[in-house]
Amino acid sequence: LGGSISRALQQMSNATIIDEKVLNECLNEITRALLQADVQFKLVRDMTTNIKKIVNLDDLAAGHNKRRIIQQAVFNELCKILDPGKPSFTPKKGKPSVVMFVGLQGSGKTTTCTKYAYYHQKKGWKPALVCADTFRAGAFDQLKQNATKAKIPFYGSYTESDPVRIAAEGVETFKKENCDLIIVDTSGRHKQEAALFEEMRQVSEATEPDLVIFVMDSSIGQAAFDQAQAFKQSVAVGAVIVTKMDGHAKGGGALSAVAATKSPVIFIGTGEHMDEFEVFDVKPFVSRLLGMGDWSGFMDKIHEVVPMDQQPELLQKLSEGHFTLRIMYEQFQNILKMGPIGQVFSMLPGFSAELMPKGREKESQAKIKRYMTMMDSMTNEELDSSNPKLMTESRIMRIARGSGRQVHEVMEMMEEYKRLAKIWSKMKGLKIPKKGEMSAL
Ligand code: GDP
Ligand code: MG
């Protein structure tokens, strides 16, 4: 996607005269790319109409960077679509709030309920989970397991078949226990059907939620708009959470959900685990949707920091998405030789320069050297694998012994590796621009 947009914009710059035809070609290409990312057709059409208005103005007079104007316009329009204009209800710590989760079966409600509870619990809240899904067998067990793991109180029943009744009882119970965040998980059924929406309406009526969150699987594609709208018509959806953003989906459906519910996206799910949950931030999301990142700055830095002869190989590895310990080792060598490549990575969405925090360069260097000593005790098989599961306990103990370090230090290094691998994998499939190609953007 990023490739085709940059290609489209590239075409623009090559044309000496900006005429209607070139602009249309460019917008057609962008339209196709956004549709591929599951942005709703109508939204794309409205956006291109707006952009035509913008770029047809005098802005494109000689002297202005035309590509920058168009790119900025696309970016801004997408950001605008994601901002419904008013923030969602935000629960207050210490004051009881009821939050109800809705969404189709499999969208990730139960997982997300726990993530949401856990996120707040870590910040000192007293959350609780209520299982009002009596439709799916095993629903209560799943919630119970999640809740137990996170040490969050839960309420549900194996025998009661009325979801409205359980929801009301659960909320009541936890209000008495002074919980400040009572989360109601609901059933989803298999498809949109009248009985589901009627059930949601009744559960909502019985629990009087302060906030209803619509949970959406990022891979549902063009169905997002209708699905979100259908829920909005039966309950007062006030916020959206998009799940499975760790997969291949670009998440263009999120724009549809916001448009259909007039509610903001508040979090995204980025994995199956409890802590794979991030506060939603519009700009990095749009960057990802467009496949941009801060590519220009990123590429400039790569060209500056990574030795010339290693650049093509590194870029190739980046686009493949495989991140091995050996690649990490080589990058550490670069860091020690050439200065903070941490800066390079900090330009990518989702990455904060944790590896090399400002003002703590000395410490970080020592840490990197320690990691490299441990990697020196690894076998080729270990260095070239991109599967962290290979690192069994006995291997970790052997590496610790061989390098004279502690087991927990080897484990810490593996955590760092996993963290970097995750960021690395986000770049998979992106077209890697050649030097100079992107810096004009
Ligand atoms: P529900 O039917 O809406 O309650 O959905 P569940 O919470 O049971 O989730 C359905 C499946 O999606 C489960 O296998 C979850 O582990 C998985 N899942 C949920 N959220 C995420 C996510 O953010 N990333 C990934 N990779 N999987 C997720
Ligand atoms: Mg569920």
Image: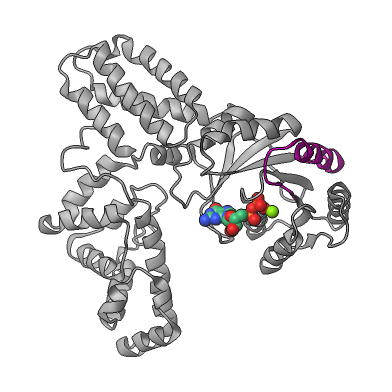
Q: Residue at x 40, y 41 (%)?
A: 288
Q: Residue at x 31, y 80 (%)?
A: 374
**Rendering quarter of residue 422:** bottom left
233 or 98: nearer the viewer: 233
Which color scheme did the rendering employ for the protein? one colour
Q: Which residue range is magenta in the image?
A: 182-210
Q: Residue at x 51, y 53 (%)?
A: 270
- On the rendered structure, is 202 left or right of 246? right
Residue 353: x, y in percent?
Answer: 37, 55
Q: Which residue reaches farthest left?
A: 309
The quarter of the image holding the C terminus is: top left
Q: In this picture, is 394 found above or below 386?
A: below
Residue 228: x, y in percent?
Answer: 63, 34
99 or 316: nearer the viewer: 316
Residue 131: x, y in percent?
Answer: 77, 55
Residue 116 shows in this picture? no
Which quadrant contains ligand 1? bottom right
- On the rendered structure, is 108 left or right of 30? right
144 or 333: nearer the viewer: 144
- On the rendered structure, is 102 left or right of 308? right
Q: Is residue 348 located in the magenta-colored stretch of the structure?
A: no
Q: Is residue 205 located in the magenta-colored stretch of the structure?
A: yes
- On the rendered structure, is 437 left or right of 46? left
Q: Residue at x 32, y 61 (%)?
A: 322
Residue 147: x, y in percent?
Answer: 71, 63
The quarter of the image holding the N terminus is: top left
**Rendering quarter of residue 48:** top left
Q: In this picture, is 189 found above or below 31?
A: below
Residue 203 shows in this picture? yes
